[in-house]
Each structure stands twice: as structure tokens, then as C-alpha cells.
Image (tube, rainbow, N blue to C red):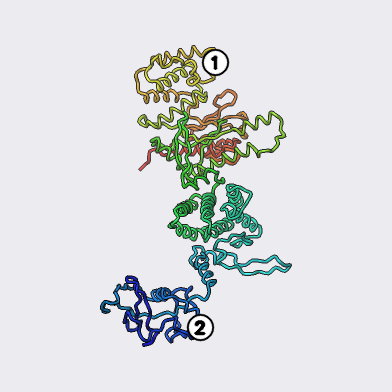
Amino acid sequence: MDADQWVQLLDRGSNTYYYANLVTQESTWEAPPSFIKYEDIETTFQPSSRASEPEKSRDDSSRISTDSSKHSPSDFSSSEPEAQQQLAEDALPEATVTSVAPDEPQTCLPPIPTLKLEPVVPETSSAASKTKKKQAADPHDVPTESHPLFAFARKYYNLTTTTKSCLFSKSKPLDLRSRLYWESGLITTPLIELPKHQMKIALQAFRNISGFMGNRSSGKGQIDHCFKLLRNVAPRSPDLKNEIYCQLCKQLTGNPDMNAVLNGWLLLNACLITFPPSKELSPYLEQFFAQHAVAPETEIALYATDAIHSLQSCFQKGERKELPCPMEIHALRDHSLIEVIVSLVDGTPIKISVSAWTTCGELSKTVSQRLGIRKTQAFALFECSSRHEERVIEADERILDLYALWERIGIEKAGKPGKKNKTNSNNSAQKETTSERTYKLLYKVYLWIDFDDELVEEINLVYLQAVHNVVNGIYVATLEKCIELASYQLYCKHGIYQSDRVIDFVSEIDQYIPPNILSPVNRAQLADQVLAAFAAQRDNSVHECKWSYLRLCKTLRFYGAAFFAVHNTRNPKMPTDVALAVHYRGLTLVSVENEAPLAQYLYVDIASWGYSANSFVFVVTQGNKDDNVEHVLKTSAGKHINDIIAAYVKYIVTLAPTSD
């Protein structure tokens, strides 16, 4: 039998060597006569005919030449039996070796399966070993084709660059693998083909990405790198936005610094809530995120899962109007929502958690559900300032865009620190007052429609709004009606009259009587009249009392009207400066001087209406089509007027009986 058909193996149970024939599957505890140990070989190693046959190695790292001219005998004689044991076992299929003592019958020796022994030769030097171990640990050894962005990169990446070392520039190719994997230095060419005027922005973006991740030292703070990147890229082309996403994926692939990787994922999520990638890049990004969503590192998996959700949302809701504020970046880092406060007219706060994708329409719906509102079309979210300016918020506006806008306005009003103010003291005081302007979200009545008595929650909100309008003098009421309304208000607050509950009512009367009626002279007298009317109240429920309050308010002039200051430019019969009141029944033009109605029009008489950026126009029918009157009013609130009229008309149409 040939010596190369026998191998020496170690029985790990008895720690004793035995010999196995790879062809006949025989095994023995004694060395066969034809078996020659490696250390007894004194001549140059000659591979057997079997070993010289070309076979495909299982691992590229073990595919080493067996040419005898490249190895000396000492390269192999230094191998210990343990090394032979490991090499032979690696070549064998998995099999169980039974421990048998040398003096026991050898019929119990385990069978050895038939196999083909691959020509395995030890590495020639320790330096080669270190090199191969380094290459095995290198993430670049991962096949480029397995990278989620490989197909996109092969189609869209810029794989040529122009050197600037000489006068005559010459293009040189770039390695696709290096364009997909992390680089410690800065790139000199954008990853994607970009116009020349955007290349500088792309290279600056990579500097910001490296600075934010911590791979590059910088004098800027981390948050400054984030906002500089978003500010430079958000208004640019889709290709440049794709470039940023590709740069982030590149720096997240094979990056050895885990802290930098986490920072990169945070920055990537900040980009997703600001601007979307193109539809061409989106499926590759989704695959990249999905691959990391199952990563063993929990934090990376959380960031990748958040990125998947953001990627799905950004195509539905589009780009931001404002850059995210710092609290959004902190929420992304903590994988948490942001708590916002929506106030009612009486100051009652409602706390609701929102994300970067929550719209004002969704927030309004959540508030309605929290309060139990059924006629949701009658209520809306308003943006209110400390200077009593308010506007209805569009349903598709993102709520955090508002917060970012408020923060930006505050920063712009305050000005840059250290900047000298050249204005006089009066202007300085005015600027200081303006900079202190604050904003809040207010949920209140939008359409003053008729509510059924059983709609308790709706009646409660309308009552709060009516009290606010009466006490602040928005509704014009006589003294007698103001006293009656105040008595209803006291009953709703205290219940049945008890003198000990209204001991200090004189000091609180400002909360019940409008300022145009109240004066320092008549405070005590009016307080006595209101308390007398309060004591005369019947034993009714609070809900019935609120209903009585609203019934009396409906008799007041301009109840439920929204007023807009406008400039008359078409009708010579009316003054130039007038007020337009929009209410449930129609439109009323009101004199600014004496608040007297100048003209009233029902919705059925309004043929058409429309608006522009600086005007509102409506046409009134007067029987004959040729006699139609067109009113052109100059105002910046044209859209607001248009929307509220459309909402009233839509509601009235829904109440109209349908004909079969």
C-alpha cells in the first residue's frame, strides 16, 4: 500500500495516535510498514499523483501552489502531529471517532469514509499569514455585488476622475469597490455624475458628514455640521440629494468606528425627515436599511427600522418647508416622539406626542378624538401669537414645521449675538418687544353652525369660545344682556348661588363683563347686579345653563362672525376701509368707524368668489345677470376668507335634502 494513503490521527478520547487508510478505510493502532513520518523525510517533498490533480479549493485563502521548487523540506518537517491531525480532519467530512484503548480488539475502530485529500501545504512565512488574516478581516473582502447599492452604483456612479497634477489633465478610472465602502479621508470627486456648480456642494457635504460622524476633527460642533449639510442640500436638485444618501451609505459600510456608525445613522435619519431620495434610489436604500434592521447591534437595528418608516412616509408627504429643529434631532437619537401642547380657549392644555411626519390635520383629528368631538368639521387648529394674531393651519402642514418656523423667527428677530444695533432707543425697544412674540396651537370653533342639544362636548367648546368673545368685547352686547350672560357664566362655574363662593367677586368682575362697559366707577354696582341675577338663577344643570348662554349670544350682532380688515377698490358707494364679516348666513360689509352694517349678502346670492395673493373678489347676483355687482377687496387674507366661505357652503349643501 502506498504511504500517502495512510494518515496519522489522534483519538481524542484516549489521547493516543492511530492510523487510517483513506482508500480501504482500514484503521490500526500500529504504524503500517509503508507509513513514513514527515520528520523522517530527508529528500525534497514530491507530491503524489493524486495531489497533483487540479481540484477546486473550498477556500481561496488555502489555495496555495504545491510546486516543489517553491518549498524546502524544512517547511513541512516542522509540522507537528497536531497540525497533521487538524489538516486531515479539515479535509475529512464530519465523522464520529470512537475512543478505543490500544489493548482492546480493533474491531471497534470507527470506519473512515472515502474522500479525496486536497493538497494542503502550510503557508511559507508568518508575514504571508498576517497578510491573509488582515485581508480576511477587511470588510472590502465582502463581494461588491452583495452591496445593496451595487446595481445603482454601476449605473449612476461616476467612475472616472481628472487629475490636477499637470497642465494637461488626464482622466483615470475609479474602483467601484472603493466608491461603495468607507474611506478615512475625503473624497475628491462626487460619487454621482453632477453638474459642475453642484460638485463643490457635494464635496463640502462629505466634509460635513465626516465631521458629524467623528471621522474627521473639526472646529464646528456636531449639530452645526448637521444643519449646514441640510441647509445646503434641501433646496437643491434630486441628484444632489441622492449624492448625500450615497455618501452616507458609503461611510456606514465597513466603518470600523462604532460611535461614528451610530452618528452616521442619526444623520441619515435627519436627512430622511428633511428631503426624500429619488424614486430610482429609493428601493436600493430600502434594501440597505432592511439589511441593517436585523443587525446584531440593537442601536443600529433601531436606526435602520426608523429609516424604513421614514422612507415610506417621505414619498407620501414630500419635503419639509423648514429644516428640523434641534429637538427633532434629539428625538431621532432617542428613538422617541415629541410632545406638543394644544390649548383650548380657556387655557386647558392637551398634551399629544407627534413625529416628524405628523400633519396638522392628523393632530386636529387626534384632539377631536381625545375630546369626544363628533362634528369635527366645525373645529380646527389655529396658530395664535402673543399679539393676538391667528390663522387656521392647513391640514397638510407638518406640525413640527410650525415649531421650526417659530424657532427660526425668534432667532432672526433676536439677531446674531454680538452684532451692534445702530437704531435709536425707541426702535430698540420695539425690536425687543417683537422678539418676545410667542406662538401656540389653539383648538377652537371654526364654523359657527347650529349644534344639537345632545352634543355635549361640542356645546362645551362653543360655550368657551362665546365667553371669550363676550368678555373681550368681540360681540357687541347691551348692559342688560352682559349682566345676564355673566350670571349664566357664574352658575356654570359655581353652581347654585352661595354667598361664600363670591366674596371677592368685585376683583374678578373683569372675567365676566367686557371692558367697554366696565369702569372704575361702576365696578361695585355692576358686581351687585350680576350677583343678584346669579342668585335668581333656577336650579338647572350646567349643560342647560351653557345652552342658555349660547341662545342669548345668538341674538347679539355679529355672533360667530370672523372679521377681516379689507380695502375697497371697486365700489364707489362704500368707504375705502371696511371690514368683511364671514358668518354662517353669508357675508356682511361693516363700517370701521361705527361698526354699522353697510351691506349683507346671503350665500345663495353670491354667484362666485375667488382670491389672489393680495385680494379677494366676490360677485353678487341681483336678479338680472347684467346687474351683477363685483366686489374687489384688497387684503392679504384672501385664501383664509376663501377657505372659510367654501367650508360654510359645503356644510350648508350637506344639510340640503336630496331629491330621489
Q: Nearer the viewer, mark 1 or mark 2?
A: 2
Q: Which mark is residue 387?
A: none
* Occupied quadrant, residue 534: top left
At which x and y percent is residue 90? 40, 74
Which mark is on residue 67? 2
Q: Residues within 10 Å of mark 2 (few under 14, many from 20)?
A: few
Question: In the picture, which quadrant includes the N terminus?
Answer: bottom left
- Mark 1 or mark 2: name the one nearer the start of the chain: 2
Residue linked to disc 1: 519
Give residue 127's position: percent from left, percent from top.
54, 71
Kind of element beneath mark 2: loop
Residue lying at 63% horizontally and 36% vertically, measured from the top left = 414
Callout 1: few (<14), some (14-19), or many (20+) C-alpha neighbours within 10 Å?
Answer: few
Query: Is residue 352 positioned above or below 167 on the image?
Result: above
* CA distance separating discs 1 and 2: 113 Å
Left or right: 63, with 195 as reference point: left
Closer to the camera, 313 or 87? Answer: 87
Q: Is residue 400 above or below residue 244?
A: above
Q: Amino acid at mark 2?
A: Asp
Relative depth, front residue between 550 and 52: 52
Q: In the picture, which quadrant includes the C terminus?
A: top left
Q: Nearer the viewer, residue 490 or 5?
A: 5
- From the viewer's perspective, tell me whether residue 323 is left or right of residue 447: right
Residue 369 at what x, y percent from top left? 40, 38
